[in-house]
Amino acid sequence: MRGSRNLLTQRMASSRASGASGGVKFVGIAVGAAAAGAAGVAGYASYDSNFRKTLENSIPGSQNLLNYAIGVQEPPAPRLKDLRPLQFSADPKVPPKPFEPKAVEDSKENAKDSSPGEVKFVETVTKIEKRIKKADNPYIGGKSSTNPEQKNENLTDSLKKHLVKAEKATKNATGAKLETIRAIEHHIQTIREAIEAGKEGDWDAVTVAHLKAKRLAEQDLEWEKKARNAVAELVTEANLGGQGETTQLNPLVPISKATATKLTNELDEMISNVKHVDSERIFVHDYSDRVAESRKKFQLELKAVHPNLNYEEGMKLKKTDLQTILAHAHLRIDQLSQKLIDNKLNEEKRVQSIVSKKKNDLLEKFRLEANSKLAAIPEVDKKKLDEELAHATAEIQKKYDEKLKEVVRTQKQLYDIEHAKDVDDAVQKERNVHSSAVGKALAQLEGIERALAGHIQMDIQNRKSKQMWLATQNLKETVIFGNRAKCCMEGRRAPLGDQMKTLLSCGGNSDEFVKTVDSSMAKASKVRGEYTEEDLNTRFNKVCRIGRRVAYVNEGGALAHLYSWLKSSLTIELKPKQGTTESLIPAAETNFTLLTRAEQLWKSGKKGDAIRVLQMTDGATRRVAADFIEDARRQQEALLLSRLLLAHAALTSIRSTY
């Protein structure tokens, strides 16, 4: 602009020197107007880079003139839209679009390596699941030669290894994701610093930070894949153990499932944290849009100040309009600078007030501490004086006590000498009184001994009754729960013979009632034991299910069984109402209805009535339920005998109490 003005001045001076003709003046005025227009165009081109590009493309040779007038155009700042943040897809089958900067040669190879990574993860998990589904479960099968305890030990060792592996892999994955979060935060900070620095921004540092964040994201995806595979293997092993007959009660099975859920939640939470931190970089996408929006706002402000101003791209501006734009821009800059200065001053005042307040608080604290120390000095002196006074008082009291003891001892000696005979008479009198009292006490003691001798037998009987009650209680719990340490149905059957011998020994082999009960108990109950109530419930449900399938079979072969199974499948089960009191007519009942009534009675706790109803069945249903009826009846008999023994022990204890 300055160069164009100097050129205009030189031309006007030369025109004045040539002469004062009218044609020369007209040429000078035309040249001056052209120079002013060129200066306005150059000024607007320096402000709007798009207008300058349009001018250079439309007018040949204008680029050299503009470079001479307003200087060479500065290269545009790098667009922030090209620096896209890392993208994370919720669907592992859809890989995110990798970032490929032009300055890095290995970016395409990294992108190729990163995109199939997640697909491989899905394929790996699918292959593992298919391989596990095809494999046989080593914990299922009761006919195998492997010991059940050995299966439990194998399952425990396997679950421990998988737990350690899953926890270690999850820890590595969470650590990798934390490193990714730190890299993303560093990337965000470098972007902010580059934006605030303007033309001097270090965009190479932004690119390096972005590449580092991308590399760490790929690494934590690999760790996440390993962690999820380890957790999947842990869950699969726990499910296999839960399907086994002897390993389903292993305490590590539910613990492993809960641990797998916890580790999965940790991984999901870390993924959510990474997405949350990465979402903060969204402001770089619309940075150019915000610049355009700020320009529009600036145009609106200019129109409010100068309504006749047409500030649109591609239009020529007058010199007055350009001066108006520059004046308004300088005014806005001054306002923003003043606002920044005011904010800094307010912040400095606030910091000074906080520092002064903190200083006053510290001074007040020091003053209180000094006052407390000064107040503690007289207290120390007073305490020392009290200690010395107490010590002196103790010495005086000690000397006084010693002197008093000597006086009392001397007076006692004088009193003993003077009243020795009186003392002997008084002692003799007291001896006689005590002798008579001791005689009476001995007589009372002899009576108490005779009374206690009569209760020895009752004490022995009471003690035996308590022992019998405890043994009977153990017998009852054995009948109900069996051997709790075993995990199979036959293993939980505990023999009752040893406990009956214990009861006979508690009664001294002289209790006829216990002997009668012992003789009434079945030999199978003493030798093999009885099924527990839970096992009987399981067997009862199985008997009812199989009995319904063969309910319509009387005598026959496979066709009759098939016909009965089809008919029972198509039969609608009509359960009688709860609490019904209608009588049961055997002639009008079928095996199907009898099984329904027996199931209802069994669930309501009337197991004896349910067994009686099962006895009314016939045909194949009766043969299916025969063994169960025998075992259930024997278990109910043993339970009844244990309750009778418990009542007998309680009555014996009450009779022997005095």
Image (cartoon, rainbow, N blue to C red):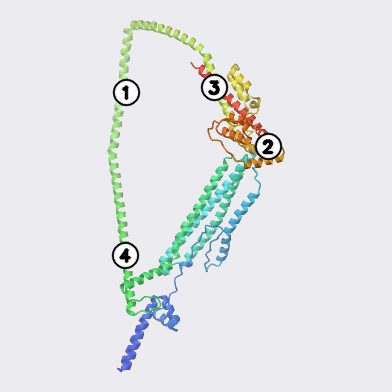
Q: Quadrant of residue 256?
A: top right
User: What's the CA distance linking mark 2 and mark 3?
Assistant: 45 Å
Point out the frontmost of discs 1 and 2.
Answer: 2
The three-letter code of the residue at mark 3 reads Ala
User: What's the CA distance linking mark 3 and mark 4?
Assistant: 97 Å
Residues at discs 1 and 4 in contact (Cβ within 8 Å): no
Residue 553's tag is 2
The three-letter code of the residue at mark 1 reads Lys
The three-letter code of the residue at mark 4 reads Lys
Q: Which residue is mark 1?
A: 398
Q: Position of residue 4 (x, y in %)?
A: 36, 83
With 596 as the anchor, is 451 left or right in this view? left
Q: Residue furthest right?
A: 557
User: What's the CA distance linking mark 1 and mark 2?
Assistant: 110 Å
The three-letter code of the residue at mark 2 reads Val
Is 108 drawn above or below residue 528 in the view shown?
below
Q: Which residue is mark 4?
A: 339
Query: Going from the N terminus, do you reach mark 3 or mark 1 first?
Result: 1
